Image (cartoon, grey):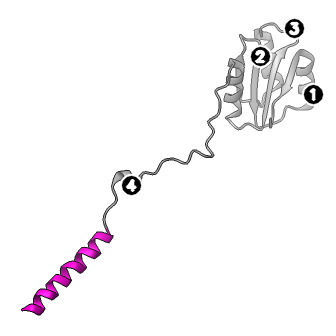
């Protein structure tokens, strides 16, 4: 009888030791705080032009141009038509800065003769890869 009590005691102790080592984690233990050491959120662009430029850049176009009239006035329907005629490969047009600038995004370059025609009429800024 003494041996059976010792055997039962050892079995219970062994069972307790095994089960306590394999306890289930709680939710608070599973969740670790995010690693913020390398996280730096981007600042929100300050002006409407910067926000619109970011919008076009985020589309990952190979080419991004900003067109504005040389006299600084608002774009007319004729100006818009000239852009579309001379830059048929541009697929994304965003008018910004109170209709004084147009941002164009494309994966295809504008042909040199067409770019020359655009540069005669507009101030052209190339933001590709910047």
Closest to the camera, between mark 4 and mark 2, is 4
Which quadrant holds residue 7? bottom left
Q: In 3D space, how far apart are the residues under numbered discs 3 and 2 (Cα atoms)?
A: 12 Å
Q: Residue at x 85, y 25 (%)?
A: 125
Q: Residue at x 88, y 12 (%)?
A: 70
Q: In 3D space, how far apart are the residues under numbered discs 1 and 3 (Cα atoms)?
A: 22 Å
On the image, the x and y values in percent for residue 69 come to 84, 12
Q: Which residue is drawn at 80% across and 23% down?
A: 66
Q: Does the segment drawn in magenta span residue 16?
A: yes
Q: In 3D space, how far apart are the residues under numbered discs 4 and 2 (Cα atoms)?
A: 54 Å
Residue at image mark 2: 101
Residue in front for this viewpoint, 59 or 15: 15
Residue stretch in magenta: 1-22
Closest to the camera, between mark 4 and mark 3, is 4
Query: Which numbered disc, 1 or 2, marks the residue that appears first in the sequence?
Result: 2
Left or right: residue 56 compared with residue 66? left
Q: Residues within 10 Å of mark 2 (few under 14, many from 20)?
A: many
On the image, the x and y values in percent for residue 73 come to 81, 7
Residue at image mark 4: 29
Closest to the camera, between mark 1 and mark 3, is 3
Residue at image mark 3: 71
Residue at image mark 1: 113
Q: In 3D space, how far apart are the residues under numbered discs 1 and 4 (Cα atoms)?
A: 65 Å
Residue in front for this viewpoint, 12 or 129: 12
Q: Which residue lies furthest to the front in this view?
A: 2
Query: Which numbered disc, 1 or 4, marks the residue that appears first in the sequence?
Result: 4
Label 1–label 2 contact, CB within 8 A: no
Query: Which numbered disc, 4 or 3, marks the residue that appears first in the sequence?
Result: 4
Query: Of helix, strand and loop, which one carries label 2?
Result: strand
Query: Which numbered disc, 4 or 2, marks the residue that appears first in the sequence?
Result: 4
């Amino acid at each position: 009888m003494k041996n059976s009590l010792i055997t039962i005691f050892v079995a219970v102790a062994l069972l307790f030791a095994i089960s306590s080592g394999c306890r289930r984690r709680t939710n608070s233990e599973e969740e670790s705080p995010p690693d913020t050491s390398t996280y730096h959120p981007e600042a929100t662009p300050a002006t409407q032009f910067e926000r619109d430029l970011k919008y076009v850049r985020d589309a990952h176009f190979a080419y991004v141009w900003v067109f504005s009239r040389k006299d600084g006035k608002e774009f007319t329907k004729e100006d818009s038509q000239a852009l579309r005629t001379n830059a048929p490969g541009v697929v994304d047009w965003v008018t910004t800065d109170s209709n004084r600038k147009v941002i164009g995004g494309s994966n295809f370059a504008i042909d040199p003769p067409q770019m020359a025609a655009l540069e005669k009429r507009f101030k052209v800024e190339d933001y590709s890869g910047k």
